[in-house]
Amino acid sequence: MTKKKKEDKSTIADKKSAEQVAEQEEVKTSTEGAEEENEEVEVDEVEKLTGELAEAKDKYLRLYSEFDNYRRRTAKERLDLMLTAGEKIIAELIPVLDDFERAVKSADSKDEKSVLEGLTLISQKFEKTMQNQGLKVMETPEGTEFDPDIHEAITQIPAPKKKLQGKIVDTIEKGYYLGEKVIRFAKVVTGS
């Protein structure tokens, strides 16, 4: 090879190595820039997450406070309701009490017919008041099938008629419903 060719090759090699060095410096510079950008992105992301966390904590505290207030308010309302639950029924029974007082005063008059009429009126008024509160009398006529869900058998006697065997012969105490719930079972005598 001639000298010129050697020089050309060395010049080309020098240019290539200069280009490689320049490329490496550019890569190094761009890598440093990318690292700086990554750090900025990470800092922005951390700040964003910190803000979201603070917001979530604030929402949690507010929700907890609202629930605690709701719990206290409902407990107070429940207590007030328990204390005043019988107020309505008591207010409706006061006139019946007044009627009983009048009946006791009129019993001194020795007029049995007027006393009986007064007691009948009081009894009817009392029954009406109780019905207005949802109380219903349980009907248990003679010959009704015995139902252990609503009847309580006090005793069992020989059936006076063959058709009354295993059925109700007599009712000792009436049973009552409050709405659809049995609040007192009917006490009955059954035939055997």
Image (cartoon, rainbow, N blue to C red):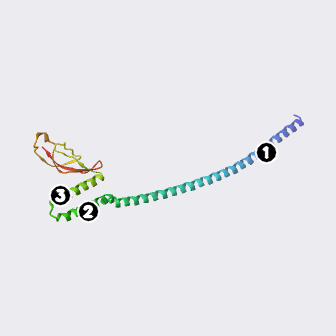
Q: Is residue 82 above or below residue 163?
A: below
Q: Quadrant of the N terminus?
A: top right
> x, y (%) of residue 165?
13, 41
**Secondary structure under badge 3?**
helix
Q: Residues within 10 Å of mark 1 (few under 14, many from 20)?
A: few
- Tell me the residue that label 2 is attached to: 98
Name the residue beneath numbered marker 1.
Answer: 22
For the residues labelled 2 and 1, the Cα–Cα distance comes to 113 Å
Pick the residue in front: 128 or 183. Answer: 128
Q: Nearer the viewer, mark 1 or mark 3?
A: 3
Q: Nearer the viewer, residue 86 or 125?
A: 125
Near-viewer residue (142 or 101): 101
Label 3 crowd (10 A; few <14 / some 14-19 / many >=20): few
Q: Position of residue 79 (x, y in %)?
A: 37, 60
Label 3: which residue? 116
Q: Is residue 27 left or right of residue 97?
A: right
